[in-house]
Image (cartoon, rainbow, N blue to C red):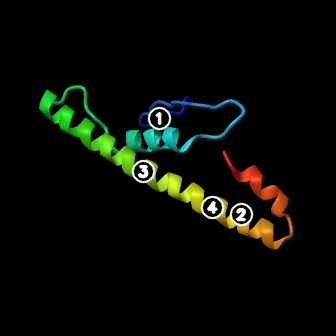
Amino acid sequence: MTPSLPGNVGSVFVETTQKRGWTPEELAIRAADKIIYVGDQSHPAVQAQARAFKDNVRQVVLFYLKEAVEQDRATIALRLREAGHSDLVHLLGD
């Protein structure tokens, strides 16, 4: 008896970094790629418009990711200071 599996599981794409986390720029590109798909078979004018929109989405996502990082670091810095570890705040810089 052989079980049959319905459907297609699709493809998996894996990206990694070495000795660091993802940068906001890298995450913004990945997000825009997931949000907007530009079909290869589309009319060139439609492709150009979709790519321009995708770039705009990437820039907006990047702006807010950077804001999130800044705000999180500010919160951590405040908590470190409140806990008496002001000397560690400099470690939060780039």
Mark pair 3, 1: CA separation: 29 Å
Q: Nearer the viewer, mark 1 or mark 4?
A: 4
Which three-letter amino acid code belongs to the residue tagged 2?
Ile
**Rendered residue at 51%/38% (across/down):** 26
Q: Are marks 4 and 2 in contact (CB under 8 Å)?
A: yes
Mark pair 4, 2: CA separation: 6 Å
**Rendered residue at 66%/45% (across/down):** 94
Which three-letter amino acid code belongs to the residue tagged 4?
Asp
Q: Which of the labelled discs sits on residue 76, or is there none?
A: 2
Q: Which residue is mark 4?
A: 72
**Dot placed on the residue nearer the N-terminal end, 1 or 2:** 1
Q: Residues within 10 Å of mark 1 (few under 14, many from 20)?
A: few
Helix, strand or loop status at disc 4: helix
Q: Are marks 1 and 4 in contact (CB under 8 Å)?
A: no
**Dot placed on the residue nearer the N-terminal end, 3 or 1:** 1
Q: Which residue is mark 3?
A: 61
Mark pair 1, 2: CA separation: 41 Å
Q: Is residue 43 visible?
A: no
Which three-letter amino acid code belongs to the residue tagged 1?
Val
Figure check: 65 above or below 28: below
Which three-letter amino acid code belongs to the residue tagged 3?
Val
